[in-house]
Image (spheres, coloured by chain):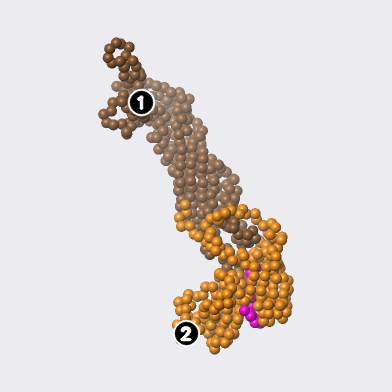
Chain colours: A orange, B brown
């Protein structure tokens, strides 16, 4: 009856991920680094440990841009048009790289899929950033959606802590105004070591020591699974959806 | 002076009208794109009730004729808005109180999904129509009757191909109060929206549905806003059906056309059979006497406030 019916895919990965790893990025996780030295940087993107693409960016003092987002799953069209340009001396003149201020941050994130990591090399080819091992000053940010208890671990020094995510009817009303929660990652310690979050609330780990942050779902929160906030009927054949 | 004059009381006229009233049946459907949403309807209806008044000015008035909606399904389809997470502040700007670096948003759907839902309005809408018209006669020649067929052969055909005088109500004024929608339509809309959302997200775990609902806020309010319903849902539905889809015009047109030319109050065969075929009581040939028929011409009809009168000449 409706003519052209739009078909929409659901990112089911958002709802069935139970491990969040700064060294293996997925849809709601991201790492950030501030590159202080001006110049061109080459990013090697890894998917499940295998390098599959290079992209570049410039750090330029003349640029005021404070945030450069690089989607590891969907790199910029410029790079697609010149797949061999980046990090190859011969093709560098053709390469159109994005720029960011030395005071700004490069944010590596994933719009779909999982298992992504990056290594960034400076113009001399020296690796200056490896998302599998964050350094002091780096940031790891994520959103936890499923109400549950989680264990957070720094796999470099075995520091651990707990995260409890809830979604009660009361907090659901204030979802859009939630403040980001910050955790300091210090040698062998998370500060604070226990945090309470609301589903989808922002969580940022500030690295004060080398680390790789892994968050695993421990158990579903019994309180949350016992009774959904709303009792929607589970009907078959969701109309226009194709599950991814 | 007319050769024949027949009078029918108001009660007889009412009985004739009730017979044709029960023949009325409407069915229609349509759909359209209205920018932010699509809509469509399917309707089936019949007529009930009504009071008949023969009036002194040679008109007939039918009042409070109820349109009974056997089915009036209004379907609405919309794209629901983006449902995204992320966007939180990663590095606050301590000088301005703003945000220096913000997390990208991740949307739950790859494109805005569309949902559709149907409001079964048939049971909660009452509609009335009033008709004022005059009685007219028409002469009906059966299209299937071959040229040259005599009246006796035409009568013997099955079905009969005899010509008829027909008596119709020719509507001059139609007044319709099409949509008096019960307040319950608000609940109906809310339930339909929730049902559609169930359909859309039913495969997700309960907490995920809760989260999506929390992100969107009151889902019903969101959809009402997309549909631009405003404060008066009844008026919105009435405008959609009445103005956008022109259901009023459709109903009026069907009733006017059918009263004036499809459903005769009375049909009088011409020539009018007076005597059936019978055995010849006299000896000899033929053994059977053919039916006796008298031709009717100049059939006229009029009424006063007490009765309907038919006048005709023979010949």
Residue at left offset 54%, top offset 83%? A41
**Magenta highlight on residue A140:** yes
Tell me: A223 left or right of A14: right
Residue at left offset 38%, top offset 35%? B261
What percent of the width, then of the height, locates residue A198? 67, 66
Q: Which chain is disc 2 placed on?
A: A
Residue A53 versus residue A59: which sits nearer the camera? A53
Tell me: B147 left or right of B120: left
Q: CA distance from mark 1 to mark 2?
A: 98 Å
Quarter of the view holding residue A217: bottom right
Pointer 1 residue: B269
What label sits on residue A60 in the rendered view? none
Spot the residue most to the top.
Answer: B283
Q: Which chain is disc 1 placed on?
A: B
**Magenta highlight on residue A100:** no
Count the labels in the image.
2
Spot the residue most to the left.
Answer: B148
Magenta span: chief secondary structure: loop
What percent of the width, then of the height, locates residue B111? 52, 63
Other residues around mark 1 within 10 Å, as few (<14) / some (14–19) / many (≥20): many
Residue B281 versus residue B183: which sits nearer the camera? B281
Residue at left offset 68%, top offset 59%? A225
The answer to whether any part of residue A159 appears in the image is yes
- Magenta highlight range: A132-144
Secondary structure beneath dot 2 equals helix
Secondary structure beneath dot 1 equals strand
What percent of the width, then of the height, locates residue A92? 47, 84
Residue at left offset 45%, top offset 34%? B23
Pointer 2 residue: A92
When the figure is inspected, residue B26 is found, relative to residue A125, above or below; the finding is above
What percent of the width, then of the height, locates residue A117? 58, 77
């Amino acid at each position: 009856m409706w003519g052209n019916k739009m078909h929409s895919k659901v990112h089911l990965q958002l709802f069935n991920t139970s491990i969040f790893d700064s060294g293996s990025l997925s849809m709601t996780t991201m790492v950030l680094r501030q590159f202080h030295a001006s110049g061109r940087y080459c990013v090697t993107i890894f998917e499940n440990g295998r390098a599959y693409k290079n992209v570049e960016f410039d750090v330029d003092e003349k640029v005021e841009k404070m945030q450069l987002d690089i989607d590891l799953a969907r790199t910029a069209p410029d790079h697609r048009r010149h797949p061999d340009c980046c990090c190859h001396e011969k093709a560098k003149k053709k390469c159109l790289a994005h720029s960011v201020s030395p005071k700004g941050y490069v944010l590596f994130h994933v719009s779909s899929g999982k298992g992504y990591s990056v290594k960034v090399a400076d113009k001399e080819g020296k690796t200056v950033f490896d998302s599998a091992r964050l350094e002091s000053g780096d940031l790891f940010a994520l959103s936890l959606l499923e109400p549950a208890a989680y264990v957070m671990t720094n796999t470099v020094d075995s520091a651990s802590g707990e995260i409890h995510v809830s979604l009660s009817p009361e907090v659901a009303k204030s979802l859009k105004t939630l403040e980001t929660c910050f955790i300091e990652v210090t040698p062998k310690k998370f500060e604070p070591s226990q945090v309470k979050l609301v589903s989808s609330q922002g969580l940022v780990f500030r690295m004060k020591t080398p680390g790789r942050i892994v968050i695993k779902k421990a158990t579903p929160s019994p309180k949350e699974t016992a009774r959904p906030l709303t009792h929607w009927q589970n009907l078959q054949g969701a109309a226009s959806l194709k599950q991814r | 002076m007319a050769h024949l004059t027949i009078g029918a009381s108001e009660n007889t006229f009412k009985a004739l009208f009730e017979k044709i009233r029960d023949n009325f049946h409407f069915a229609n459907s349509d759909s359209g794109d209205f920018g932010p949403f699509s809509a469509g309807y399917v309707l089936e209806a019949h007529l009930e009730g009504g009071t008949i008044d023969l009036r002194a000015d040679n008109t007939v008035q039918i009042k409070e004729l109820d349109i009974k909606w056997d089915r009036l399904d209004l379907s609405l389809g919309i794209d629901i808005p983006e449902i995204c997470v992320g966007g939180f502040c990663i590095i606050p700007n301590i000088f301005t109180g703003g945000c220096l670096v913000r997390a990208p948003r991740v949307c739950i759907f790859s494109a805005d999904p569309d949902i559709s839902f149907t409001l079964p309005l048939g049971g909660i809408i009452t509609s009335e129509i009033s008709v004022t018209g005059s009685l007219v006669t028409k002469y009906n020649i059966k299209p299937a009757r071959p040229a040259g067929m005599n009246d006796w052969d035409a009568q013997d055909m099955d079905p009969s191909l005899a010509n008829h005088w027909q008596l119709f109500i020719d509507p001059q004024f139609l007044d319709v109060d099409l949509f008096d929608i019960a307040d319950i339509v608000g609940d109906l809309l809310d339930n339909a929206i929730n049902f559609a959302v169930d359909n859309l997200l039913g495969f997700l775990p309960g907490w995920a549905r809760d989260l999506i609902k929390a992100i969107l806020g009151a889902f019903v309010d969101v959809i009402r806003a997309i549909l631009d319903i405003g404060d008066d849902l009844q008026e919105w539905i009435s405008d959609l059906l009445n103005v956008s889809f022109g259901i009023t015009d459709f109903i009026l047109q069907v009733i006017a056309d059918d009263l004036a030319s499809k459903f005769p109050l009375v049909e009088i065969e011409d020539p009018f059979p007076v005597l059936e075929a019978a055995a010849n009581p006299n000896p000899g040939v033929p053994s059977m006497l053919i039916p006796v028929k008298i031709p009717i011409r100049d059939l006229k009809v009029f009424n006063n406030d007490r009765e309907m009168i038919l006048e005709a000449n023979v010949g």
